[in-house]
Image (spheres, coloured by chain):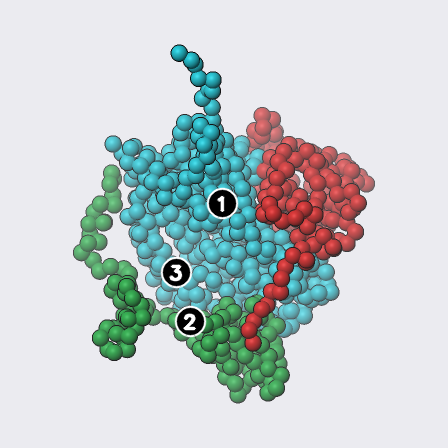
Amino acid sequence: MKFSMLPKAFAQMFKKPWTNKFPAKYAPSNTTKFLENVQAGKAKIIPPVETPPGFRGKIQYDKEKCIGCQLCLKVCPSEAIEFKPEGKKIKIYLARCTFCSQCNDICPTNCLSMSNEFLLADSNLYSKDLIVE
Amino acid sequence: MSKSSTTKSTYQIPIVPIHPALKEPVFFEFELDGEKIVDVDVKLGHVHRAIEWASRKRNPVQILYLAERICGICSYCHPIAFSLAVESTADIQVPERAEYLRVIHGELERICSHILWAGVAAHEIGFDTVLYLTWQIREKALDLTEYLTGNRVTKAITMIGGVRRDITQDMIPKVQESLKYFKDNFEKLRGIFLDDKTFKMRSQNCGVLTKENALKLCAVGPTTRASGVKKDVRVDTSYFAYGDLDINYTTPDILTGEVNGDVYDRIIVRLLEVKQSIDLIEQCLDKMPAGPIVAEPKIAKLLAQLKKANGEGVGLHEAPRGEVIHYVKFDGVNEAPYTWKVRAPTYNNILPWIPMLKGQQIADIPIVAASTDPCMSCTNRVAVIKNGNRYELNKEELHRLSVEKTRRLML
Amino acid sequence: MGKTRNIGGKIMTEEKILTAEEIVNNFTDEFKIKIKDTKIKKRSAGVKKNETAYIWMKIDKSAFKDIIKYLCELQFPHLAVVSGNDLGNSIELIYHFTLNYGNRMKETILNISVELPKSNLEIESICDLIPGALITEREKQEFLGVKFVGIPDNRRLFLPEDLPEGIYPWRKDETGPDKLYRNLHEVKK
């Protein structure tokens, strides 16, 4: 057929667009002002698409179960885990983490797990939100 | 009246890194006579990241994640080829269920990659509507990948000796629903790419690679299959579960009956491979046996076993772009491998650019270069001299020229 | 089943599928002591356990070009890549070929390794027999310092032009790149 895209392009005008408009319908021209408006309740953030179960997001650490065996340090590809000798616990730097969850697999006591948080951007690489201990 | 002392001769264009048709930097230098290309020279090295050197102090499990970041779109085939090489060296036998699961993930990646390429090829011709349509279909494939592996791009599903996650009974309905969506939309894509007049007039007899050149220059992947050479690691060797499945070489004469080796044939080969991948995933879901998914579940024990391994091995895999080969050598003393060599498929597809581009026009450069589906990140771990003055063409200029040629042909 | 292929004007007649043992016997009969060591390894996969053969051959440097010429006449191979090992006093180059492609599950992977002493790092280029070897030979020249005699193009491929001469990144001795990198893990504690 000669111009087979024309009927499909025409039909799309009457259908709902595929894109989920996260965070707002149009990109805000001033991001800080937009966030202030959200805090004040004047604007609303459209939520992102739901993540499936098993999504590899921010790592969660159960301090009580950790025995300090240091196996997770051995398999981390980017050396994002640091061992604290006093107390025998670990400290994870999320700025270096690659979210591979290999440390979850090797841990003998299952004290590490992945949550579904992925909105982790921060201007300071070593801020409190980006260090898990 | 004095005659001019210079005669008309060729001039050279460099097309500098940040190239139009590729998403990664590469340097082309073309020698032109009017609008026709006389000679081509390629310079690489802009994304060289010393990955093989970085493997010298990491153990094999860490190297899996290093290999995954060689390239974003081929992020499954590099860890898999490395894993095959290590299993060949250390004589690790992979369980049968893991072999079938590996096929499923490999074919899913192939679907994502070929659909992305189809969109990029349409964009180079100037047909942006098709770009959005194909990438909309690709979103479903990425959603399925996220459901099965946890992330859209860096899948992290490979482990030496098997895979890390299983496809359980409750996941299968979602897989089948996605496969049905692909099958319904495949006919739509096929109609647009293969029957539409725009694609045909732009890509037929453009960028021809003869069968003799494809054999001599050791080309791999859909580039060489479109020239009639039957080379496909999945059919040639028996690895994963391909030996049990019904699979054959994809050459353009299945659809049109003749082999030309031009850009249109490459479009045909890639679309037929998408159909073949959907079929293979269905066969795997039917025939998958039950059992363990990894040879050695305790990773500390696996690392100790690999530390004692001594020897060398190669692993070959058919990536969406061609044949990937990894070579690994262990010395039995250190945990890190002694040598690791990666060869990505685009490496072998660089030399065929030279006979393909000679004789073409400048406006054809984007579509011909994009038709080999180059991935410069995998390969690396264009200055015009007109009348003596050197000037450079950038991305927007070349893309504009390509779109203008389409408009000219349509009138 | 015989097929004919036209490679560079020469018609290769009657290509039949050779098994791994036949290939090894062909080479040892023709070159006798120049083939120092051969090993065939078979790996099986899937439920039906179909096998693929891997041949590893060590050859002497003096007969290298003749062996490659013999291989091209036996059946035109597909050169996958050349990999290199730094063994202390010598450098080992391994040429990875594949044969018998085009037939279902009959492909054999042939790995030919040549050892070059570090005092004389020269070897003939095979670009006249297999033009597709140009890129991989250029890569070995700049990464390991091996000189390919007769190569058509001598320039650097991946490394930048301002990297000093004499630094070979894949070597493990004093010409390695250890002097050129800074501390990699600078983390503010």
- Closer to viewer: mark 2 or mark 3: 2
What amino acid is labelled 3 in the image?
Leu
Q: Callout 2: 10 Å neighbours few (<14), some, many (20+)?
A: few
Q: Residue A100 at x, y = what percent?
A: 51, 68
What amino acid is labelled 2 in the image?
Asp
What amino acid is labelled 1 in the image?
Val
Q: Colour of chain A?
A: green
- Closer to viewer: mark 1 or mark 2: 2
Q: Which residue is mark 1?
A: B26
Q: Residue at x 56, y 29 (%)?
A: C6
Q: Earlier in the sequence, mark 1 or mark 3?
A: 1
Q: Which mark is residue B263?
A: none
Question: Quarter-wise, where is residue B405 in the image?
Answer: top left
- SS assignment at label 2: loop
Could you tell me if residue B285 is visible in this image? Answer: yes
Q: Residue at x 19, y 54 (%)?
A: A13
Q: Same chain, marks 1 and 3?
A: yes
Tell me the quarter of the image containing the N terminus of chain B: top left
- SS assignment at label 1: loop
Q: Which residue is mark 2?
A: A122
Q: Residue B35 at x, y = what percent?
A: 40, 29
> Is B297 rendered above or below residue B209?
below
Q: Callout 1: 10 Å neighbours few (<14), some, many (20+)?
A: many
> Is B283 rendered above or below residue C61?
below
Q: Colour of chain C?
A: red
What chain is the cyan one?
B
Could you tell me if residue B352 is visible in this image? Answer: no
